[in-house]
Image (cartoon, rainbow, N blue to C red):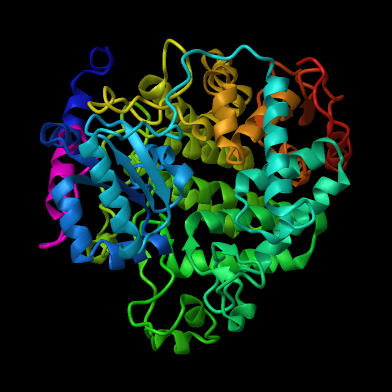
Amino acid sequence: MWMKQHGYRWLLGACVMLIGIAAQAANFGQEGGIDWQPWDKTSFDKAKSENKLILVNVGMEGCTACNRMERVTYTNQNVVDLINKHFVAIAVDAQARPDIGERYSDWAWPATAFLQPDATQVFAMAGNRLPRNFIPILNDLVDKQTAGTLKPDPRSPYAAAPEPVETELTKIRDQVRLQLDRALNDDYGWSRWGLNTEIDGPRLEHLYFRAHLYDNQNLRDLALATSKGFLETLDPVWGGAYIKKIAEGSQGVPARFSKLMAIPEKRISNQVNAITAFAEAYRITGDEAFREGMRNVDMYLTDWMLDSSKGYYANQKDEPEGLPEDWWPQDYWLLDTADQRLAYGVPPIDHAVYTDKNGEVIRAYVLAAQAFDAPEYLQKAVDTATFILQDRQQVEGWLLQSRENQAMLDDQRVHPHTEEARPFLRAQASMGRALLALYSTTGEQHWLDAAVNVADGTLATLLDSKNKGFFGTVPDSTANLIPPRKPLEDNAQAASFFYDLFIMSKLPRFETVAEETIRAVAAPSILAREGRITGRTGLALEQMTAAYVEFSVVAENANEAAQQLYAAGIDAYHPRKLIHFEKPGRYPQLGQASMFICNPDRCSLPLSKPEEVADVAESFRGGATSL
């Protein structure tokens, strides 16, 4: 059916993709090493025909544990021989294939899953293992397969929910709130959550959102404490935020690391989380420490992670190749001058430029431009968005996740990069939200038009027309073995995108997409399974149940008075704000530029003075009552 709808353009793209995968597969394993295979049907067919177990190795280039397992365990000859004899080994880059990365994200990186020849998962584990720990696991699985005693893993990744849920959205929202709050208490304690900067951006945004909605000072203090925690993970020499803090006194951590209580990986998502933390906190406090934190992260992104194309690289590893054997990576990052560090080399950078990650960077820079009144940050967002659209947007509107670039040629990759000619939901949703952020900030129609194109491409390629919601990617020839999946958090991000898009575009075809998407994926069992990894879901549900607050600047043209009203709208802090220019029609022509602030319940009187905007916006703090 899908082929009938989309014709031969997709077939041609698929052929190109398969050729690329075949070329990559030829280079997966080094001579005498593990015979790594790509994730495609031929690999699964090989396992079935040879009655071999399947080992799936999923990770990312900037992951310390992934690199150590590759360097120590997967080069051990006993491990190599055992895997090549009894397993079909599949290696996947979680960022190049975000659909597979999301599927195995419960086990972090590296995720190692073991499947029977028919692709039924029997066991999965998180983190790296030394050969002495790994070999007994492999032998046990082989012995159990021979004895016929392997059993399906009850924690195997879930498939798409069979039908949409009918529960009221407020009840689903409350379940997600409860899960997130319980995770805070169980893992960190409310008083200590601000010390843990592994908290992702969506969960922190969810906290700021609720603090504003209910004018709750306890939630606000907790969010601000978390933002301050990010300041403690910044590299004072080259800039950038490390992945997370380590609790003081952690077992096995040398005392000399008290000045750098961090895991020294610099992932692009962590830079985005830091920017979000600093921008949100500065809007509330005006504390210049957050501006300095933003400058630090921007320095790192600009000096180290920016490609000549204006796209941003994915990750930086934690240590250079020339580090002394008795050093920890933290020893390197504690060196307090660039010259001292350069004497040992530079930790390798993964030069892949991923669309979903660049969408995150774009939106973060837009938030920073608004918070710090910094046009240079907005220009960086514009440059990156322009590159992604020009380089990756397809005729149907959807965007490629990545392309090979010149800088990648010398990368020594742990996981193979595959240039996939297919849409991934994460890339479409991330860039869609980024484009809307640009439209809202600049008022320029072409960004809205670009967002509409991405939305139409997403609907055309990834929508489940029967039960709604979006697949993580287009179901392919492995779908009969590995059930297609509708990732909860990626669908939630898509729901946020479509919700805002309908309000800003008023196009009827987008009106019901957000709610249908949430209902398609928010089955109680799936929400419970995801647990704390529901920040985007929580945000989408808060957004949809509290409802939008629309700032419409009504004028025949963007004259000086209209621009001043628009700037006042940008300055007004309101997490539910959707601001745009609008021609007279829905609102009357009053002979001068006017702003109307509305939610589904009510609208303000027309505002003509910029100094009125903040106070009227504050009166729309609470949620709408009509939902």
Rendering coords of residue 537 (x, y %) = 61, 32
Which of 502 and 591 lies nearest the eye of the viewer? 502
Rendering coords of residue 297 (x, y %) = 57, 65
Rendering coords of residue 316 (x, y %) = 42, 65
In the rendered image, residue 30 lying in the magenta stretch gets the answer yes
> Where 512 sits versus 95, above or below?
above
Residue 111 visible, this orientation: yes
Task: Give left or right: position of 341 versus 217.
Answer: left
> Where 364 sits versus 338, above or below?
above
Q: Quadrant of residue 588?
A: top right
> Where 141 sits versus 455, above or below?
below
Task: Give left or right: position of 498 versus 358.
Answer: right
Which of 155 and 196 lies nearest the eye of the viewer? 155
Task: Give left or right: position of 143 versus 452.
Answer: left
Magenta span? 18-43
Which of 266 and 323 lies nearest the eye of the viewer? 323
Residue 373 visible, this orientation: no
In the rendered image, residue 469 lying in the magenta stretch gets the answer no
Residue that appears at 21% across and 36% down: 40
Quadrant in which the C terminus appears: top right
Q: Residue extending furthest front?
A: 147
Q: Quadrant of residue 372?
A: bottom right
Residue that appears at 11% across and 62% down: 32
Quadrant in which the N terminus appears: top left
Q: How many marks?
A: 0
Which of 374 and 365 lies nearest the eye of the viewer? 365
Residue that appears at 25% across and 33% down: 148
Residue that appears at 79% across and 28% down: 597
Rendering coords of residue 402 (x, y %) = 32, 46
